[in-house]
């Protein structure tokens, strides 16, 4: 039985039924649907629509339905068009026709929006805790990196030496913004649509403030038309998940690069690498390639939902049934990916020597310019002088540290014998001591702050 057969003389065409049915997707809202129904039964009982006995019977019945779902014992019927129909059908089997009173003053329109929001209020903390776990792995790696130095890049060209710890933590902070974005979204998800009915608001005098509270929502929606059509929260959620995907893909791309023979900065543990069916020597970073690839999928589901929402007439249109699949898909991707990435990073080997060897003296050219700045020469000039020294070293095919002092002094008489100290990468790092810089002191502070943040 559908919930809407009364005015129809023939059954819905089977293929149209298949198209229309959403059970395959929305059965994930089973528990939320039962909880929403329990709360609704309570609300209409307060108004006298349900007698004490009817309310008790519906509540006991719904509790049984919930138990069946949570124990995996619920059996769907071919006539279950969606999760709402399934719950009501089962309730009717359990308690008889009195179940038909539950839907008084309610529509599937406000029901589905409520279920979906309830589901998301549960998913957000789950995602946040998976993100936190990855952050913990990044902080652990930063801590064990100690004074390990590596080349920092811009334009993927060697730029300046940095601490490996600084690099690890550069992937911590984006995830922190992701967590904050998700937590900020909660206040917009936590608005209860139930009581908006089909579109115009329920005709039952329910106390929507109390109803919101009983379901754990911050407040009831203020405009029934908007409440029925509002899927901003789903779009925002997908932006959050997509941004996480993008952050992870940037980290992943660097792991892919840094595990190549050409870079050789890291080696993945066997447990997180895969082989080739043809080339016996291959050790592939599939986990990170998939991370990179899934970001594309996630961008797709975000733009897909935005396209669904664009130009929709208010209030409910069946197009809105397309809102759940993308949200579930992005969530599932992240909940699988985040722990794998965390564990792959926890077991990665750092090739300290390779990182150090990748630093050459040209990366200290800025320090050479700064050396002259310390002697009072304007940076614009010192930049040009340092550039000339770089070119000279290139012409002579030696490192800048190998050029004789006379060569330096020929470009600028202010150069003295201590100039060679600028080619010490760790010294260069130590000079970047402002808040947020790569010096040991600054990074140690950063680690302490991240640890504190991550533990709350
Ligand atoms: N399966 C529908 C959805 O997910 C539930 C709402 C149905 N409402 C309706 N007026 N047909 O959007």
Image: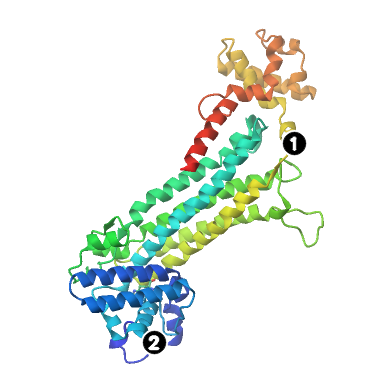
Residue for badge 1: 354
| Residue furthest bottom in the image | 9
* 210 sits to left or right of 182: left
Is 368 above or below relative to 275?
above
SS for callout 1: helix
Mark 1 or 2: in front is 1
Residue 12, picture quadrant: bottom left
* Viewer-closest of 186 and 7: 186
| Residue 432 makes an appearance in the image | yes
* Viewer-closest of 273 and 402: 273
Mark 2 neighbour density, 10 Å: few (under 14) some (14–19) many (20 or more): few
SS for callout 2: loop
Contact check, label 1 and label 2, Cβ < 8 Å: no
Q: Position of residue 115 (x, y in %)?
A: 37, 66
Give the CA distance from mark 1 to mark 2: 68 Å
Residue 21, picture quadrant: bottom left
Quadrant where the N terminus is found in the figure: bottom left
Residue at image coords 72%, 28%: 360
Q: Position of residue 442 (x, y in %)?
A: 55, 27
Is 262 above or below relative to 146?
below
* 302 sits to left or right of 396: left
Q: Position of residue 4 (x, y in %)?
A: 31, 83
Quadrant where the C terminus is found in the figure: top left
| Residue 197 makes an appearance in the image | no
Asked if ligand 1 lies within 8 A of label 2, the reply is no
């Amino acid at each position: 039985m559908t919930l809407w057969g009364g005015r129809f003389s023939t059954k819905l065409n089977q293929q149209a039924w298949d198209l229309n049915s959403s059970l395959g997707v929305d059965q994930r809202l089973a528990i939320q649907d039962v909880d929403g129904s329990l709360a609704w039964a309570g609300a209409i009982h307060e108004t006298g629509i349900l007698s004490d006995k009817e309310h008790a019977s519906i509540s006991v019945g719904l509790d049984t339905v919930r138990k069946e779902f949570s124990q995996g014992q619920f059996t769907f019927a071919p006539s279950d068009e969606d999760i709402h129909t399934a719950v009501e059908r089962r309730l009717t089997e359990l308690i008889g026709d009195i179940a038909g009173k539950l839907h008084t003053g309610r529509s599937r329109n406000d029901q589905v929006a409520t279920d979906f929001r309830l589901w998301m209020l549960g998913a957000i903390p789950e995602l946040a805790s998976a993100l936190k776990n990855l952050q913990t792995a990044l902080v652990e790696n930063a801590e064990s990196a100690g004074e390990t130095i590596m080349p920092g890049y811009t334009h993927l060209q060697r730029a300046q030496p940095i601490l490996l710890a600084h690099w690890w933590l550069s992937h911590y902070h984006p995830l922190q913004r992701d967590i904050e974005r998700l937590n900020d979204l909660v206040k917009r998800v936590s608005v209860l649509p139930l009581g908006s009915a089909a579109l115009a608001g329920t005709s039952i005098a329910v106390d929507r403030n109390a109803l919101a509270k009983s379901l754990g929502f911050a407040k009831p929606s203020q405009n029934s038309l908007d409440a029925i059509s509002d899927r901003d929260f789903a779009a925002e959620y997908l932006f959050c998940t997509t941004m996480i995907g993008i952050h992870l893909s940037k980290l992943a791309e660097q792991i892919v690069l840094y595990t190549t023979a050409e870079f050789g900065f890291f080696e993945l543990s066997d447990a997180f690498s895969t082989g080739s069916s043809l080339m016996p020597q291959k050790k592939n970073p599939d986990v990170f390639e998939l991370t990179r690839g899934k970001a594309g999928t996630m961008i797709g589901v975000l733009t897909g939902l935005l396209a669904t929402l664009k130009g929709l007439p208010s209030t409910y249109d069946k197009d809105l049934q397309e809102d759940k699949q993308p949200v579930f898909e992005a969530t599932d991707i992240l909940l699988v990916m985040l722990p794998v990435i965390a564990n792959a990073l926890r077991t990665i080997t750092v090739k300290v020597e390779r990182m150090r060897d990748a630093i050459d003296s040209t990366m200290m050219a800025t320090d050479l310019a700064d050396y002259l700045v310390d002697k009072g020469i304007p940076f614009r000039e010192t930049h040009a002088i340092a550039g000339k020294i770089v070119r000279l070293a290139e012409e002579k095919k030696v490192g800048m540290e190998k050029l004789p002092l006379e060569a330096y002094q020929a470009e600028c008489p202010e150069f003295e014998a201590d100039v060679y100290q600028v080619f010490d990468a760790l010294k260069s790092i130590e000079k970047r001591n402002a808040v947020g810089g790569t010096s040991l002191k600054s990074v140690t502070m950063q680690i302490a702050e991240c640890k504190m943040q991550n533990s709350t």
